[in-house]
Image: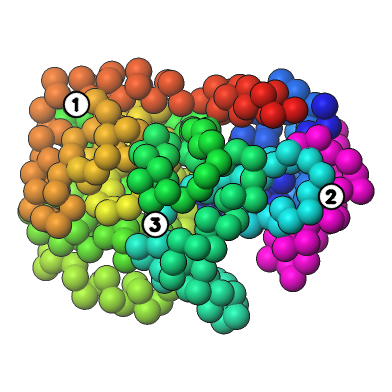
């Protein structure tokens, strides 16, 4: 079996969600079967398994992308897996699995600011209706997504005629810093973008009722967005913007008497929640189906439209018995999500197709 794995979405500066998913799943899959990776930048090689086989083709945002199948046909793969849905499939002579991570941008079509003006326009046009996504996904033999919640959303929207499988995300393994839990969490950690649907506003406003605690906003942020959010900080509240941190700094903050928080209205999986639970750090998150799927009994839940509700859930963690119960439940639950398990699920589907 000649299996190609599309690794072109791996970032070489820092991982975002799709980049980490691509790298971690690819490495886990290579442990159990023979894989040839597709890259576009030689700098991506460092994120592949040692001595990995690879083929260098065009960038996934190249004008050649719609014609990728004609490029790959000459290599005669049996099957190609892509962690995204944008790879060209027309005219392919092989089996194809595509991945779509969520439906967030159909409800919130604002494009990422790091894209060029032309790509931002294309992004908005793509997400105006379901039609482009349906065309893309129906170009595959099987569609993968990252959670049961998203799979149900796809089915309700009739997003594809193809079978849908779940290849879950999984937390990265933190192990350097020893987790400290004292009388109650003094540090509230948010890891994620500052897109409007992430609803960081509720966390900031909720600090009005959390004196003596610090809200750490870790991710990169534009000056305009930071200025906008700074105006919301309650008088006397301790809210800190980091503008991006390393994985080690992220882990150190989670380990330091902390709780992971998110008021997001939309998520495809909620990776920061999984990462916190795997470390033994409780979470306080929006009362949404996806967070219940990922957090289960390891989190407390609040109405994301009510900042005071968020604050009240954080204060409940001052109860040591409750906190320890959440930590125990969270570790047990999140242990079900591993890259090895996801790779085995993917390989099982691959074998049914080839």
The answer to whether 117 is drawn above or below residue 306 in the figure is below
Give the label on residue 152, or none. none
The residue under the point 19% across, 59% down is: 202
Residue 208 image position (x, y, % from top left): 10, 59
Question: Which residue lies under the disc numbered 3?
Answer: 104
SS at badge 1: helix
User: Which mark sits nearer the N-terminus, 3 or 1?
Assistant: 3
Give the label on residue 72, or none. 2
Q: CA distance from mark 3 to mark 2?
A: 30 Å
Left or right? Give the position of 88 relative to 146. right
The answer to whether 251 is drawn above or below residue 197 in the figure is above
Magenta stretch: includes residue 57: yes
The residue under the point 27% across, 40% down is: 289
Residue 70 image position (x, y, % from top left): 84, 56
SS at badge 3: helix
Tell me the quarter of the image containing the C terminus.
top right
Question: Which residue lies under the disc numbered 1?
Answer: 323
User: Which mark sits nearer the N-terminus, 3 or 2?
Assistant: 2
The answer to whether 294 is drawn above or below residue 155 in the figure is above
Left or right? Give the position of 273 relative to 78. left
SS at badge 2: helix
Residue extending farthest right: 74
Q: Nearer the viewer, mark 3 or mark 2?
A: 2
The answer to whether 253 is drawn above or below residue 197 in the figure is above
**Extent of the magenta region:** 51-79
Mark 3 neighbour class, 10 Å CA radius: few under 14, some 14 to 19, many 20 or more: some
Left or right? Give the position of 72 relative to 192. right
The residue under the point 43% across, 21% down is: 336
Q: Nearer the viewer, mark 1 or mark 2?
A: 2
Q: Nearer the viewer, mark 3 or mark 1?
A: 3
């Amino acid at each position: 079996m000649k299996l190609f794995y599309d690794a072109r979405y791996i970032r070489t500066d820092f991982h975002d969600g799709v980049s980490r998913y691509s790298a971690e799943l690819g490495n886990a899959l290579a442990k159990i079967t023979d894989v040839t990776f597709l890259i576009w930048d030689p700098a991506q090689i460092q994120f592949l398994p040692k001595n990995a086989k690879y083929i260098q083709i065009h960038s996934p945002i190249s004008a050649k992308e719609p014609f990728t199948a004609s490029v790959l046909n000459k290599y005669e793969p049996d099957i190609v897996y892509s962690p995204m849905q944008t790879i060209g499939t027309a005219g392919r002579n092989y089996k194809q699995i595509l991945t779509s991570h969520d439906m967030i941008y159909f409800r919130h079509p604002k494009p990422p600011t790091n894209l060029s003006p032309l790509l931002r326009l294309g992004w908005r046009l793509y997400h105006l209706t379901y039609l482009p996504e349906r065309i893309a996904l129906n170009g595959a033999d099987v569609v993968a997504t990252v959670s049961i919640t998203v799979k149900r959303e796809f089915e309700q929207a009739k997003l594809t005629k193809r079978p849908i499988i779940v290849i879950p995300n999984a937390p990265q393994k933190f192990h350097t810093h020893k987790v400290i839990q004292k009388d109650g969490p003094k540090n509230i950690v948010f890891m994620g973008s500052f897109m409007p649907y992430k609803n960081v506003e509720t966390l900031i406003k909720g600090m009005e009722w959390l004196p003596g605690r610090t809200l750490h906003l870790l991710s990169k942020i534009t000056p305009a967005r930071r200025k906008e959010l700074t105006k919301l900080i309650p008088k006397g509240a301790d809210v800190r913007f980091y503008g991006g941190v390393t994985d080690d700094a992220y882990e150190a903050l989670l380990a330091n008497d902390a709780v992971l928080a998110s008021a997001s209205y939309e998520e495809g999986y909620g990776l920061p929640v999984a990462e916190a639970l795997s470390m033994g750090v409780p979470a306080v998150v929006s009362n949404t189906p996806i967070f219940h799927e990922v957090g289960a009994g390891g989190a407390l839940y609040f109405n994301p439209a009510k900042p005071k509700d968020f604050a009240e859930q954080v204060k409940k963690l001052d109860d040591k018995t409750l906190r320890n119960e959440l930590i125990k439940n969270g570790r047990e639950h999140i242990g079900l999500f591993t890259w090895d398990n996801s790779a085995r699920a993917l390989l099982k589907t691959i074998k049914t197709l080839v």
